[in-house]
Amino acid sequence: MSESDYARRTRARTAINRLGGHADVAAVSFVPAAEGPTGRPVVELAIRGDAVPPAVLRELGRAELSIFHTHRSSGVLRVVAVAE
């Protein structure tokens, strides 16, 4: 594993820790690079509401995560963010 892989994983896990307590986040999980759709660590979020709140966007940006995909499912907005 290269240092950049370690850094990506660390940033993703840090974002999960910070976003887990956010009021608009119903659930958050980590998907390892080997299991994700892009070959990089992924953070999956379930957001209450119709849009990603600015505070969540700031946290994703702070962790250098990019939104890869969003869709509505089971009454929540599902967000897949990839560690860059």
Image (cartoon, rainbow, N blue to C red):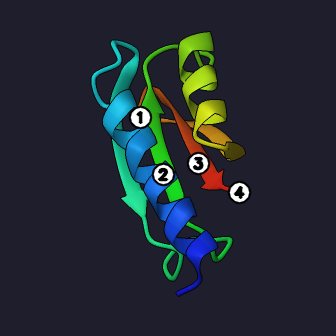
Q: Please tell me which of labels 2 and 1 falls first in the chain.
A: 2
Q: Whole-percent x and y of residue 65?
A: 64, 45
Location of mark 2 (residue): 12
Location of mark 1 (residue): 74
State how far apart marks 3 and 2 are (Cα).
12 Å
Location of mark 3 (residue): 80
State how far apart marks 1 and 3 are (Cα).
16 Å
Give the structural element (helix, strand or loop) at label 4: loop
Q: Quadrant of residue 2?
A: bottom right
What's under tag 1, amino acid-wise?
Answer: Ser
Whether residue 16 sits left or right of residue 52 in the image: it is left
- Residue drawn at x 43%, y 34% is 46
Closer to viewer: mark 4 or mark 1 = 4
Q: Quadrant of residue 41?
A: bottom right
Q: Quadrant of residue 15?
A: top left
Q: Please tell me which of labels 4 and 2 falls first in the chain.
A: 2
Location of mark 4 (residue): 84
Dot label at residue 5: none
Q: Whole-percent x and y of residue 63?
A: 58, 40
What's under tag 2, amino acid-wise?
Answer: Ala
Q: Please tell me which of labels 1 and 3 falls first in the chain.
A: 1
Category of crowding for the residue at label 3, using alpha-carbon neighbours closer than 10 angstroms: few (below 14), some (14–19), many (at least 20): many
Give the structural element (helix, strand or loop) at label 3: strand
Question: Going by the picture, which residue comes out furthest to the bottom?
Answer: 1
